[in-house]
Image (spheres, rainbow, N blue to C red):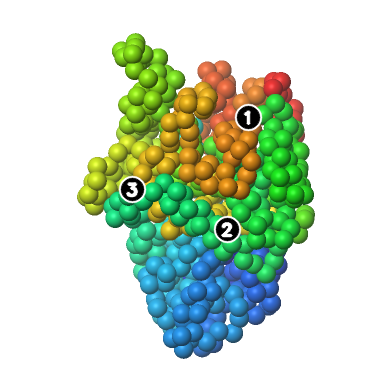
Amino acid sequence: MCGIFGVLQHNSDSVPHRQLLESSARLLEHRGPDNQGIFADKAIGLVHTRLSLLDLLPRSNQPFCDQSLRYQLVYNGEIYNFRDLRTRMEKDGIQFRTTSDTEVLLQSLIHYGPRETLKNIEGMYAFALYDSRDRSLVLARDKFGMKPLYTYSDADRFIFASEIAAMRPWVPFEPDLLSISSYVQGFFGPTKGASFYRNIKIVPPGTLITVARSHEPQTETFFEMSDLWDDDLYERLNRQKTEEVVDTVDEMLLNNVRMQLVADAPVGALCSGGVDSSTVMAMAARTHGNLAIFHANVLGPESEYDAAKALADHLRLDLKIVDVNDSHFIEMMPEVTRHYGHPFLRHTNSVPFLMVSRLVSENNVKAVLSGEGSDECYFGYPNMIPNTRRLLRAARRQWPTRSIGQFIQVFRGNLPTGEPLDSTSGLGNRFELHFENDRIRSRLEQISRRRVKAADLIGLSHLSYHLRTLLHRNDCLGMAAGIEARFPFLDSSLVRVAVNLPYRYKVRFSPLTRVRKHLYLRDKWIIRKIADRYLPRHLSQRMKMGFPAQAYYRMNISPDFFRNSHVSQILELTPDQMRHLYEHSDQKMKVRLLHLDVWAHVCLYNLPDGETIARMKDNITFNSQ
């Protein structure tokens, strides 16, 4: 929805420099092209750049103050249940002067306090509330990390922002060598706590921060993944008839789609061709007169254009496409990296994502529905499902007379657990995955009446680190084009149902399924069952393809690219050491080093994109597909 920035000075009553505030506003302008607002007073400066989606009038511009002028709010996101909350508050005698969710959030924070507000609001958000009487700040980030929030703190000031780049006028940018070392060794980058920049922190999802002037920030967790665990809900779902459970999830998802279509500006949908986005689109098309839909067509043998076009034809909608070719993965890499804020190698589809976001913007649409979150909730990734082909080969030798169905019953508990997390690999990323997975496991063992299975831990793990990386991609590259992504699958009530669904609703024996790794197992069974109600079966039962963006792994990167590179500067390698590193690196490592070099060029040192694009074009070719 927007970009936010703020600085609270601990030891000075001077007004923060307005030119610096304006510089931060310019660096966030892409997130909010409709309006820029600045509030500056003794020791405090707040910045807001607005993407107008609700109550488009100037009265809802931010920073947004109450009528007493005591409180100032800067807020990025959407509160989807704001109308229900407003009705409740009006019954309590609270009056409103706008029709925005911003004012609902402000009034709730004032009258009910942050903790009660965070219990009641449903949506995606990062916000900061300044109390001029106490000269204090309250900040929070949503449960799943849909909206970003970064902080910097020292003895003199506390700074927060939607993007690290907005801190550049205020903070020296230095590389965090532990994060970079971890990335080079195979980790894709932190998603909470430390960042790629020294002393700049990523606020974890579900976190509330209070900052009193001249005091250390105080943090508390108001939500963690294990909070979704509900034995009573599991038992209720387990007793219900299958059709009743399918109806429940269908109704909840449809309601979320309707709720997330609410806006005073045009809302469209992303059309990948996969079952998740296709189902969301089909639901949206039932309540939206002429839904605008968009597709990034990555040219080549794995193009999903045919599936996207088939869906558009079925729904009688006009599909708008942007073609993506190999050259885009070089020409746009610096710009994508600049918005991403760190190397984006985990999601190589980031280039087509920015291109399709721009296509959305060019068509005057400001928000898009996405199918993100379904795979994490309903087991849509191959590494969440038993590798039955391998297991079948071993089992047939041991039990030659058993049927396929009997084998599958045995395999249901034989889920992949991933690579063990050793202390050496964990040290580089400050044990982000270790702590989180251990915390989830120990919490479930404390609170659960039923046996905690591998599938439960795998599901909650994917809803943690992996989902945060996807949400970061969607936010930063959508907002780079002034586009907001919305996620109907990630309503917290629906995610709670998904987490507590019996396993048979996620993965089910299907003798017609011929997926290579999970032969005879149908993933996302309940979502496909719902999709059957809205889509033809060749779309509802289509197997997950993954975004076809493997261009980086088809690159031939010349060693000349790394002569006098930023990588050697950061890692303090001599030319001979850098050459040795290149010669003993496989393709994955060379691509990692390429991304790290481009990140340092455009993010760390803020150098022109053209220089690194020219260097890549001179030193990189592509193998044929």
Name the residue type under label 3: Asn
Residue 532 drawn at (x, y percent): 57, 43
In the displayed structure image, the side of residue 593 where residue 482 appears, left or right: right
Tell me: residue 538, above or below residue 625.
below
Residue 155: which disc?
none
In the displayed structure image, the side of residue 625 where residue 544 appears, left or right: left
Give whichever of 297, 137 is nearer the camera.
Answer: 297
Give whichever of 156, 403 is nearer the camera.
Answer: 403
Name the residue type under label 2: Val
Tell me: residue 539, above or below residue 34.
above
Judged from the image, the secondary structure of the residue bearing numbered disc 3 is helix
Q: Name the residue under label 2.
A: 257
Image point 33% across, 13% down: which residue? Answer: 401
In the displayed structure image, the side of residue 477 where residue 519 appears, left or right: left
**Residue density around tag 2, few if under 14, some if 14–19, many if 20 or more, within 10 Å:** many
Image point 37% across, 70% down: which residue? Answer: 115
Q: Name the residue under label 1.
A: 550
Judged from the image, the secondary structure of the residue bearing numbered disc 2 is helix
Image point 32% across, 50% down: which residue? Answer: 239
Label 2 – label 1 distance at C-alpha: 31 Å
Image point 72% across, 24% down: which residue? Answer: 621
Residue 238: which disc?
3
Residue 540 drawn at (x, y percent): 59, 40
Are the residues at dot 2 and dot 1 in contact (C-beta closer than 8 Å)?
no
In which quadrant is the C terminus drawn?
top right
Name the residue type under label 1: Gln
Give whichever of 247, 82 is nearer the camera.
Answer: 247
Label 3 – label 2 distance at C-alpha: 26 Å
Residue 438 drawn at (x, y percent): 29, 43
Lower position in the chain sequence, tag 2 or tag 1: 2
- Does residue 366 show up? no
Residue 469 drawn at (x, y percent): 51, 45
